[in-house]
Amino acid sequence: MSKTYQKTETDTPDAPGVAVPERVSVAMAEIAESMQEGLLALAVGAGMQVM
């Protein structure tokens, strides 16, 4: 049995990130904003239950 488990390197692109259309970026920003609002509502609801 050899000890070469996960020691090989993979080729990754040198680009800083994935290029996506602006429309997709706007949609993702809206989803992130909705998630933040939902988490805030969840935290407030949990706090009210504790009181």
Image (spheres, rainbow, N blue to C red):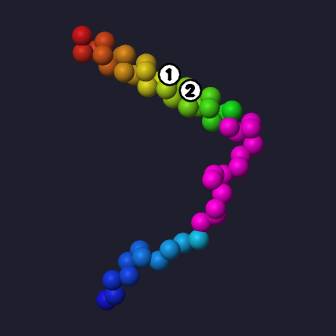
Q: What percent of the width, then of the height, locates residue 40?
A: 43, 21
What are the residue bounds of the magenta stretch?
A: 12-25
Residue at which label 2 appears: 33
Label 1 Cα neighbours within 10 Å, binned few <14 / some 14-19 / many ≥20: few
Residue sitting at 74 percent across and 38 percent down?
22
Could you tell me which secondary element the residue under label 1 belongs to?
Answer: helix
User: Which amino acid, mark 2?
Assistant: Glu
Residue sitting at 40 percent across and 22 percent down?
42
Residue sitting at 31 percent across and 12 percent down?
48
Q: CA distance from mark 1 to mark 2?
A: 6 Å
Could you tell me which secondary element the residue under label 2 belongs to?
Answer: helix
In contact (CB < 8 Å): disc 1 and disc 2: yes
Residue at which label 1 appears: 37
User: Which amino acid, mark 1?
Assistant: Glu
Q: Is residue 9 magenta?
A: no
Q: Main secondary structure of the magenta part?
A: loop
Q: Is residue 26 above or below residue 44?
A: below
Apparent side of residue 14 relative to residue 44 in the rendered image (left or right):
right
Residue sitting at 54 percent across and 72 percent down?
10
Label 2 Cα neighbours within 10 Å, binned few <14 / some 14-19 / many ≥20: few
Q: What percent of the width, then of the height, locates residue 8?
A: 47, 77
Q: What percent of the width, then of the height, locates residue 12?
A: 59, 66
Q: Is residue 2 above or below residue 25?
A: below
Q: Of residues 28 and 19, which is closer to you in this image?
A: 19
Apparent side of residue 1 relative to residue 9 in the rendered image (left or right):
left
Q: Is residue 17 magenta?
A: yes
Q: Which mark is residue 11?
A: none
- Image quarter of residue 14: bottom right
Task: Return the residue found at the far left.
Answer: 51
